[in-house]
Image: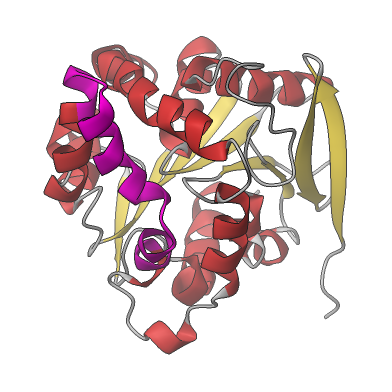
């Protein structure tokens, strides 16, 4: 069977060019893939064709990430609210009124903002190592983020900058992997090349500081989840040191009908587990 064709497109949203990958029949159920840090829609390069036979797949790059516009921190206010506004604007431009949201890492706060704003459009959630509970924040993240949120200064910024280093980017892909030699180095090479662009460190630090606004929304998101009970699939790399397994289990308190699938992986799992993830998504959401 031939591979589905993937299209690489741009759309002008609120005056900025947003890049997105698109595949599948637009008449099929839509699934929107929301990437994590420090990645882009590139992280879904294997999952997109695995889903496109039964879904209309959209995978955007946030402003400042991947192939989307990356204005400087003085030209654009890098907040999770503003990143969400550009994703929502893209979905509106594409005329998507019903879709499943796949959320990984930064995709969590962006997707849950969309869900809380327009729950009638969101027909389901796929949550892959995307946290929404303090119980799910591992020590590896707390040690950096909590001091930064208490006071942004030279010392706390220096600690946060470790998240922008090449060795950390590589670590995020390899940690918890069953077979590290099965993880493509394209992951961290592509991500790091974008992180190393002049000025990128400034707005990435702004986003790390702004992440505390996501934590402030946790209670509201929990209320929305309990109220609307979206059909939910949790696929979680159980060796993730940043968003630990307790974060997956916490979702089940608000979404008792959700399905939780543990994966033998870390923060990023798709290099080794795309077939499993695609099968689970199709079993739950395909028509």
- The residue that appears at 73% across and 25% down in the rendered structure is 91
Can you say which quadrant of the picture contains the N terminus?
bottom right
Residue 133 in view here: no
Image spot of residue 190 (x, y percent): 62, 62
In which quadrant of the rendered view does residue 224 lie? top left
Q: Is residue 11 above or below residue 21?
A: above
> Camera-side residue: 39 or 46?
39
Instruction: Name the residue furthest front.
Output: 154
Q: How many marks?
A: 0
Reply yes or no: does residue 149 show up in magenta. yes
> Camera-side residue: 32 or 211?
211
Image spot of residue 139 (x, y percent): 12, 47
Reply yes or no: does residue 90 show up in magenta. no
- The residue that appears at 66% across and 40% down in the rendered structure is 61
- Magenta stretch secondary structure, dominant: helix
> Camera-side residue: 208 or 96?
208
> Camera-side residue: 254 or 172?
172
Image spot of residue 217 (x, y percent): 31, 15
Q: Is residue 68 above or below residue 49?
A: above
Q: Is residue 113 left or right of residue 83?
A: left
- The residue that appears at 55% across and 49% down in the rendered structure is 195
Residue 269 in view here: yes
Image spot of residue 136 (x, y percent): 18, 41
Q: Which residues are magenta?
A: 148-172
- The residue that appears at 56% across and 26% down in the rendered structure is 122
Q: Is residue 53 left or right of residue 257?
A: right
Q: Is residue 106 left or right of residue 263?
A: right
Colouring convention used in this rendered image of the protein: secondary structure
């Amino acid at each position: 069977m031939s591979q589905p064709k993937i299209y690489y497109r741009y759309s002008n949203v609120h005056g900025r060019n947003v890049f997105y990958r698109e595949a599948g029949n637009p008449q099929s159920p839509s699934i929107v893939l929301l990437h994590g840090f420090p990645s882009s829609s590139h992280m879904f390069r294997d999952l997109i064709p695995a889903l496109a036979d039964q879904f209309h797949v959209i995978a955007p790059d946030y402003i400042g990430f991947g192939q989307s516009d990356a204005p400087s921190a003085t030209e654009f206010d890098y907040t999770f609210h503003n990143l969400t506004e550009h994703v929502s604007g893209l979905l509106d431009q594409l005329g998507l009124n019903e879709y499943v949201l796949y959320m990984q890492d930064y995709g969590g706060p962006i997707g849950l903002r969309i869900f809380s704003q327009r729950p009638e459009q969101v027909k389901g959630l796929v949550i892959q190592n995307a946290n929404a509970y303090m119980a799910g924040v591992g020590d590896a993240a707390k040690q950096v983020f909590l001091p930064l949120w208490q006071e942004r200064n030279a010392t706390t910024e220096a600690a946060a900058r470790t998240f922008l280093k090449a060795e950390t980017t590589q670590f995020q892909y390899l940690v918890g992997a069953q077979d590290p030699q099965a993880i493509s180095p394209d992951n961290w090479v592509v991500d790091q090349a974008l992180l190393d662009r002049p000025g990128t460190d400034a707005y990435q630090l702004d986003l790390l500081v702004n992440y505390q606004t996501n934590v402030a929304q946790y209670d509201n998101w929990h209320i929305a989840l309990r109220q609307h009970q979206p059909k939910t699939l949790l696929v979680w790399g159980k060796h993730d040191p940043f968003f630990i397994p307790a974060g997956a289990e916490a979702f089940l308190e608000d979404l008792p009908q959700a399905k939780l699938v543990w994966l033998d992986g870390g923060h990023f799992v798709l290099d080794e587990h795309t077939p499993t993830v695609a099968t689970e998504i199709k079993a739950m959401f395909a028509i």
